[in-house]
Image (cartoon, helix red, strand yellow):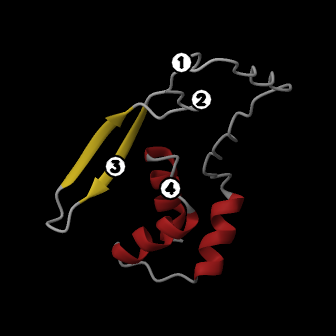
Amino acid sequence: MASCGLFARVGAAASAVSYRRLHILLRRDGITINRKKTQRRYREGGLTVRRRKGRKRAVGARAPAPVLALPNQRWSLDFVHDQLATRRRHRIFEEPQKAPYKT
């Protein structure tokens, strides 16, 4: 069948083409083939899409945060994002207060 040559050509050219995308490419080239048949030939041809790696997670337990005895022992920095009614965006750089403020 003519689709066998196209399977090999597309598979060699782009290894990240899924069987769904391959089915669309076959239809564009004028080859009418059943989707299930496309999937079966894709599998028989040994074509696969590389799977993404999983997210790396932290290993072990975290150390507990130290207890603050005095103000200004810990400082933090943060960005605050917002959008006005005119759709203009702005970003503010702030220093949030972590310890209670004593006067």
Looking at the image, which is closer to me, 23 or 84?
Answer: 84
Residue ID for mark 4:
17
- Secondary structure of the residue carrying tag 3 is strand
Q: Amino acid at mark 4?
A: Val
Residue ID for mark 1:
72
> Residue 58 location in percent, x, y?
75, 29
Residue ID for mark 2:
99
Answer with left or right where residue 30 lies relative to residue 39: left
> Residue 14 location in percent, x, y?
46, 47
**What's the CA distance linking mark 2 and mark 3?**
23 Å
> Residue 40 location in percent, x, y?
69, 70
Looking at the image, which is closer to me, 1 or 41?
Answer: 41
Q: Residue at x 52, y 53 (%)?
A: 8
- Secondary structure of the residue carrying tag 4 is loop
**What's the CA distance linking mark 1 and mark 4?**
56 Å
Q: Amino acid at mark 2?
A: Ala
